[in-house]
Amino acid sequence: MINKGHEFGTSQRADRLKRSFISLLWLVLGLVIIPLLYITGVISIETVNKLGRYMTYALVAVGLDLIWGYAGILGLCQALFFCLGGYAMGMYLAHHGGPEGIIDKTGWKLPACLYVVYPYKVGEAPQDALVPWFWKPFWSLPITVVLGLLIPGTVAFIIGYFGFRSRVRGVYFAILTQAITVAAQNFFSMNNMKFCGTNGLTRFEKIAGFELANSKVQFSLYLLTVVMLFLVYVLYRYIINSRLGRILIAVRDDENTLRFSGYKPYLYKLFAFVLAAATAGLAGMLYVPQMKIITPHNLGAERSILIVIYVAVGGRSTLSGAIIGALGVSLMYDNLTSTIPWAWPYVLGSLFIAVVLGYPDGLVKLPQKLFNKFKSPTAEDKLEDSPTS
């Protein structure tokens, strides 16, 4: 018993060291190797910008891994939360966009992207256009950042509170969240809602007074994205290793037993769901100034499913697998769509089926599995494999 306890403690320490090494490896890759390649001219600012956008996808995937991999909640609305944060930042950038547009009757400058598709009523002229009241708070960057986290979190709280309290689980919760996402896409696509319709928010020029077209600004946004991804990873890892994380895993494995033990599982699920939504909102705010556009297309049903594929391919319940899946699948998408675009859906579907059916642990655990398979068995392994008398 003592030896087994000692081995278990040693195994736990080894796992913590391995996770710490992975965290350090990602940090070195993002903050040292990629910048060094850019500074020496090996890669261009366009490549750095592309990697920065892919890391925002990784942020969303890490949030989904928390709720799906650890809490057992398959939510298909992460794209909605991503776009809520993205639209918040987009409205701020549109306020500080190009010189086009007009000054309305109240003295506010109508953003150029809204001026082009403003839903005029019968008899109204361009000078009758007004900046919508819900656009005005997003003039300030600090307020935009707060709202970009608060709005997705609030929407997630409303969805989760009523869904989890009603014990909506499994595929039913997935369908519910997907339906909400599709409804939100239709909402943002309507010109009357004054979110610029299907054109989306664009014509961005400055952020915090700095030109977005400047390569130094784009490089700084990349570094900020890497730092945010690392901090979120550390926060999530801390939560998972805490008592709260063990309760989330218990919710996933046997929610009814946990409920009979006196806990309220819906509160823990609600916490994880809101935290993942705020993380997706943060990712959206980092994505928009690097992509320079946000449209209802980002809310499409396929986007939420793609995030699920990121996590499934990389490996559920690992966090690092979500990052690997997001970066790997995104790079594959970029290469295939630029060469043989028609093949992308088939490759993605085949990859998903192959991983789910052939290797459900994901790619992140593949090297360890291969190592264990081909390494020479130790004396202890042979003893364990031998039949008991």
Image (spheres, helix red, strand yellow):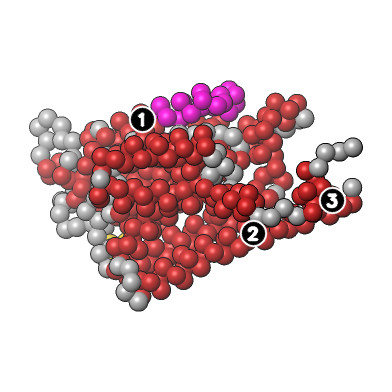
Which amino acid type is shown beneath numbered disc 2?
A: Lys
Q: Earlier in the sequence, mark 3 or mark 2?
A: 3
Task: Tell me if residue 179 is in the magenta stretch.
Answer: yes
Residue 310, x across and y down, in percent: 45, 44
Q: Residues within 10 Å of mark 1 (few under 14, many from 20)?
A: some
Residue 158, x across and y down, in percent: 50, 32
* Residue at figure coordinates x 30%, y 67% from the top left: 44
Asked if one can make out residue 294 in the rendered structure from this viewpoint, the answer is yes
Q: Residues within 10 Å of mark 3 (few under 14, many from 20)?
A: few
Q: Nearer the viewer, residue 129 or 269?
A: 269
Asked if one can make out residue 236 in the rendered structure from this viewpoint, the answer is no
Q: Residues within 10 Å of mark 2 (few under 14, many from 20)?
A: few
Task: Tell me if residue 270 is in the magenta stretch.
Answer: no
Q: Which residue is mark 1?
A: 182
Write down the region rendered in magenta.
Answer: 162-180
Residues at discs 2 and 1 in contact (Cβ within 8 Å): no
Which amino acid type is shown beneath numbered disc 3?
A: Gly
Q: Which mark is residue 5?
A: 3
Q: Secondary structure at mark 3?
A: helix
* Residue at figure coordinates x 9%, y 32% from the top left: 123
Q: Earlier in the sequence, mark 3 or mark 1?
A: 3
**Residue 22 horizontal side relative to residue 145, left or right:** right
Q: Which residue is mark 2?
A: 18
**Residue 262 horizontal side relative to residue 350, left or right:** right
Please state, as top left, top right, bottom left or bottom right, where the C terminus lies in the image. top right
Q: Earlier in the sequence, mark 2 or mark 1?
A: 2
Q: Quadrant of residue 177?
A: top left
